[in-house]
Image: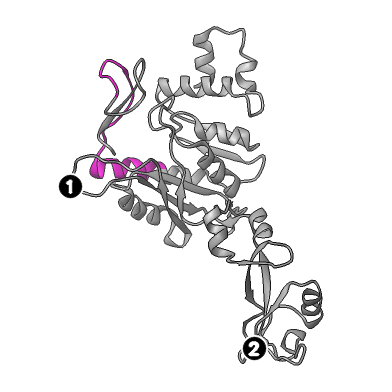
Amino acid sequence: STNQDYRTGGSRTATVSASAADAIAYSDQLNGATYIEFLRRRLILLKHVMAPNASIYVHIDCKVGHYVKIIMDEVFGRSNFVNDITRVKCNPKNFARKGFGNVKDMILFYSRGKDYTWNGATQDFTEDDLRRLFPKVDGLTGKRYTTTPLHAPGETRDGPTGRPWKGLKPPRGRHWRYPPEELTRLDKAGLIEWSSTGNPRKKIFADESAAKGKKRQDIWEFKDPCYPDYPTGKNLDMLKTIIRTSSNPGDIVLDCFAGSGTTALAAQHCGRRWIAIDDSQAAIETIRDRLLKDKDGPPFALYKTASNRSRSEERRVGK
């Protein structure tokens, strides 16, 4: 619902900066209630074909995303709303306009039901993260670390985590996170730090946490390519993150507004099957060319078997 024509051809592939002489890849002229109804009907169909453990991610411009969320609440149910993800898509802009610069899009994430596939999502710690989150340095190893409490909320009246350890009881209303024998093992291994007042805390080292990564939050920085093969081409790593998080190897990934085919390419790399749909011939040709030229994923078998067909026949197979 951007009210723009997206062009591709001899000049830079873009929107408003493309040459009017270039071919229109697709026309995005639906607005207001017409656009919302266009999307609502497709969301109803998508829900019908989704597996019980499936999820749906709708990437949308922030100017219309809040209306789309209302429609998705209607179609999928408010209880199946998982996240509203803010996606940083580009570098800061300095356009002369009365307003703040726009560097974000929305991704609305809903599930088909409660038992949806979730493989977790992590991201790397930055150097600033490590210095801020692990401010202490071990005198023997030189490793950065922080400490966390050895107790947790809730009393344990009969179990081992409610018993005294080294003459200490857990604070009132709390219990030890580990049974006494595990606390003793941690202490002997030098993984417990004792304060000057005799309060024990567990050491958490930066290198161990960095190897696991940190939990991904709902603000993502995945910037789109500056010179895409097709207008509005998306970041490949972003699509891989979504696919790995919400599907398993061998699952089917569907993108019914496939555009440049980044979803299909990401699914190919991640070992998923895929269906890519678009009504733009320019999009279909871009997807075919990207898959044929791809060196990182498995062979694109569909066109390998069609190598002796004419170009028009290849297009028909891809479409």
- The residue that label 1 is drawn on is 98
Residue drawn at 77 percent across, 85 percent down: 160
* Corner quadrant of residue 295: top right
- Whether residue 213 is situated above or below residue 284 in the rendered picture: below
Circle on res. 197: 2
Tell which tag, 1 or 2, sits nearer the viewer.
2
Q: Earlier in the sequence, mark 1 or mark 2?
A: 1
Residue type (three-letter) at the residue carrying disc 2: Thr
- Whether residue 45 is situated above or below residue 108 in the rendered picture: above
Q: What are the residue bounds of the magenta stretch? A: 18-42
Q: Where is residue 76 in the image (x, y as percent from the top left)?
A: 44, 54
Residue type (three-letter) at the residue carrying disc 1: Lys
Looking at the image, which is closer to me, 257 or 211?
211
Q: Is mark 1 on a helix, strand or loop?
A: loop
Q: Position of residue 226 (x, y in %)?
A: 40, 31
Few, some or many C-alpha atoms within 10 Å of disc 2 (few <14, some 14-19, many ≥20)? few
Q: Is mark 2 on a helix, strand or loop?
A: loop
With 167 as the anchor, is 205 left or right in this view? left
Q: Where is residue 174 in the image (x, y as percent from the top left)?
A: 63, 86
